[in-house]
Amino acid sequence: MRVLIVTAVEAEAKSIGDHKDTIVIVGGIGRTNAAAATTQAILEQGPFDAVLSAGVAGSLPGAGAGAGMDLDLGDVIVATKCVYVEEGLITPEGFKGMQGLGFTLGSFEGNEVPVDSDLLELVIKDYRSGPIATVATCSGTDEAAREVVRRTGALAEAMEGAAVVHAAMRLGLPGLEVRAISNTTGRRDAQRWDLRRGLSALGDAIRAALASLQG
């Protein structure tokens, strides 16, 4: 299996390193960079059998509630779906996603980009799993973080996952998002950070994921 891995920044790519039958690219921050870089890599460096969005993420308040433990710094989460946060409509009654707007973003309903079930099954056994939010604006207040949870039910937020998986889907390739927790979200001066721990966990997780995918 030949795998394309899309990261946002060089530090994430370096933590993943080089692997057989794997291309790791630095696509840039945010959804536009992620979608464009993923598409370009598939067309110019393919063929690929799978696409992974990989990087660090911020845990959201209440992450892991009911699961016996909350996400902590250095934990790894595999997306069961990648959820666009901002796309939709603001009404007097609150936010409505794409279904409320009456349009679609692609061959899926609402704001939830589905990950590939076969890839998920191969990787999920080793890690926590749940929705991961794809944001354009990171949550630097408690209210903003709670709103992301309310809209998406996500356990963590990052800025590229849905766009990478969406772009792969448009080109007929299975996609998955894997994240390591580097920080908490919410009020900026109260956030906890350990980027080094998150990057180390990301490298370990991707090595394990590739071992599962490539046998």
Image (cartoon, rainbow, N blue to C red):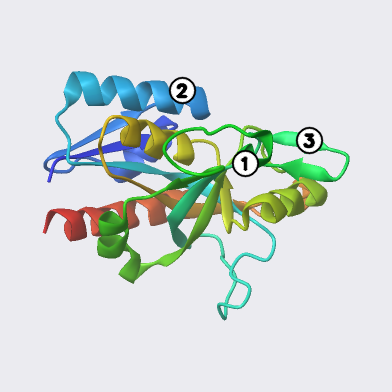
| First in sequence: mark 1 vs mark 3 | 3
Q: Nearer the viewer, residue 170 or 4?
A: 170
Decide: few, some or many residues near mark 2? Use Cα within 10 Å; few <14, some 14-19, many ≥20.
Answer: some
Measuring from the top left, give residue 207's x and y in whole percent. 25, 54
- Front label number (1 vs 3): 1
Residue furthest to the front in view is: 102
Mark sitting on residue 99:
1
Specify whether 111 is left or right of 10.
right
- Identify which residue is drawn at 12% across, 40% down: 21
CA–CA distance in space, label 2 to label 1: 25 Å
As helix, strand or loop, the secondary structure at mark 1 comes to helix
Question: Can you identify the residue that label 2 sits on?
Answer: 33
Whether residue 140 is visible to the viewer of this picture, yes or no, is no
- Front label number (2 vs 1): 1
Whether residue 89 is visible to the viewer of this picture, yes or no, is yes
CA–CA distance in space, label 3 to label 2: 26 Å
Q: Nearer the viewer, residue 2 or 25?
A: 2
Decide: few, some or many residues near mark 3? Use Cα within 10 Å; few <14, some 14-19, many ≥20.
Answer: few
Image quadrant in which you'd find residue 76? bottom left
Question: Can you identify the residue that label 3 sits on?
Answer: 90
CA–CA distance in space, label 1 to label 3: 12 Å
Measuring from the top left, give residue 195's x and y in whole percent. 52, 48
Q: How many marks?
A: 3
Q: Is residue 80 above or below residue 177?
A: below
Measuring from the top left, give residue 137's x and y in whole percent. 67, 34
- Identify which residue is drawn at 25% across, 35% down: 172
Q: Nearer the viewer, residue 43 or 21?
A: 43
